[in-house]
Image: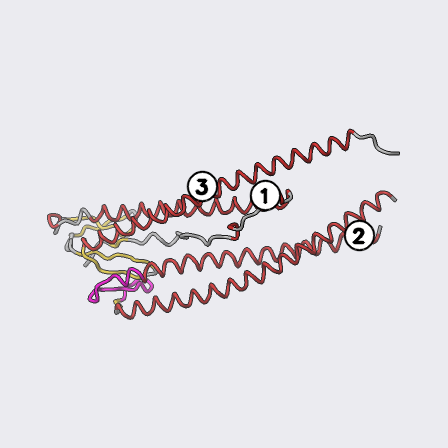
């Protein structure tokens, strides 16, 4: 009976572990999709800036004021921002892959444990 | 100065999500019920995501259309006319329309560009078309997920019926002592 109890505890621990990994994965995935949205918006802005005439007036909203900005400078800034976000996305992708592997490993361990537990339970029931 | 600031409604739009791992061909019949359930959940999520994107795009497009229509009131004949400028949504101050030639357009991420009304109209036309294109891309994906989901549900139902039959057969057999 005691053996069954330890197995049950083990199973619960593994389950918590698995759920933890799952949560981490979800969090990273949502950060990733937010970055996607940002990247998209920046790309749209970049395209728009590329279409402008060289003498266009461009302003940047800083706090409540619009500050006039040089068009070339604005383009460079958006370009840098895109680079940064792309780098960040790569980083998040690596983390996601890592978590996915962890999740898969944890899932396998959990299933094995579950099967062992069920077998033990069935045996105990017969005895 | 330029009275009309036209806002950029794209912030909430996640445009085309990555094509997921679903692309690989899977033989549905080879999967067990648990795997099918997972697949169905994934398809559900994707359907929701596409539907959400579609809705945001529609809302964004509507805003562009409104901005474009508002530009039509900036005609030379309206120059100098008295207008009420909203300071808050419930308080207005009188003002005069001093400039009907140029507007400030929010192109996203805090960047504003001064444009003539004609340029601004062209800008909105472009944006409206862009929204339409994106929606046309999402629509088939949404349909694809819906039909895949139906296929998964069909297989799940078949499997469940099979399982029930097997259980009934087993129950029908006399248990060995």
Measure the alpha-carbon separation of dots 1 and 2.
38 Å
Q: Nearer the viewer, residue A59 or A97?
A: A97
Give the x, y percent position of residue B175. 84, 32
Q: Quadrant of the N terminus of chain B?
A: bottom left
Residue at the spot x=31%, y=45% of the render?
Answer: B62
* Disc ID at residue A72: none
Q: Which residue is mark 1?
A: B28
Q: Is residue B99 left or right of residue A107?
A: left
With respect to residue A82, does B8 lie above or below?
above
Q: Quadrant of the C terminus of chain B?
A: top right
Q: Is residue B170 above or below residue B39?
A: above
Q: Which residue is mark 2?
A: A5
The residues bearing labels 3 and 1 have C-alpha atoms spaced at a distance of 19 Å
Q: CA distance from mark 2 to mark 3?
A: 49 Å
| Chain of the residue where label 1 is placed in the rendered structure | B
Q: Secondary structure at mark 3?
A: helix
Is B69 left, or right, of A93 in this rendering?
left
Chain holding disc 2: A
Please name the residue shown 31% across and 54% down the image.
Answer: B8
Q: Position of residue B17 (x, y in %)?
A: 44, 53
Give the percent coordinates (x, y) of residue A15.
68, 53
Lower sequence index among marks 3 and 1: 1
How crowded pointer 3 is (Cα within 10 Å; few <14, some 14-19, many 20+) is rated as few
Segment colored magenta = A47-67
Question: Residue beneath label 3, please?
Answer: B143
């Amino acid at each position: 009976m005691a053996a069954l109890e330890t197995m049950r505890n083990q199973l619960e621990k593994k389950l918590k572990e698995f759920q933890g990994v799952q949560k981490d994965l979800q969090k990273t995935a949502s950060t990733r999709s937010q970055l996607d949205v940002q990247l998209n918006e920046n790309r749209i802005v970049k395209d728009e800036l590329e279409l402008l005439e060289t003498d266009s007036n461009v302003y940047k909203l800083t706090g409540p004021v619009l500050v006039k900005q040089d068009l070339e400078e604005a383009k460079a800034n958006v370009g840098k921002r895109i680079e940064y976000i792309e780098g960040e996305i790569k980083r998040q992708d690596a983390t996601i892959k890592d978590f996915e592997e962890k999740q898969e490993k944890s899932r396998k361990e959990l299933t094995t444990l579950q099967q062992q537990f069920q077998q033990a339970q069935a045996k105990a029931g017969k005895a | 100065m330029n009275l009309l600031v036209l806002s950029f409604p794209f912030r909430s739009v996640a445009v085309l999500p990555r094509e997921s791992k679903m692309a690989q061909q899977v033989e549905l019949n080879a999967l067990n019920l648990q795997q099918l359930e997972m697949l169905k959940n994934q398809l559900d999520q994707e359907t929701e995501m596409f539907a959400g994107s579609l809705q945001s795009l529609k809302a964004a497009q509507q805003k562009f259309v409104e901005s474009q229509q508002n530009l039509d009131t900036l005609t030379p004949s309206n120059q100098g006319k008295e207008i009420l400028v909203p300071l808050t949504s419930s308080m207005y101050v009188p003002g005069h329309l001093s400039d009907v030639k140029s507007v400030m357009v929010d192109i996203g991420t805090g960047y504003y560009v001064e444009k003539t009304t004609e340029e601004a109209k062209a800008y909105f036309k472009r944006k409206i078309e862009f929204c339409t294109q994106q929606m046309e891309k999402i629509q088939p994906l949404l349909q694809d997920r819906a039909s895949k989901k139906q296929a998964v549900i069909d297989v799940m139902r078949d499997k469940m019926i099979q399982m029930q039959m097997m259980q009934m057969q087993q129950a029908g057999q006399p248990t060995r002592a």
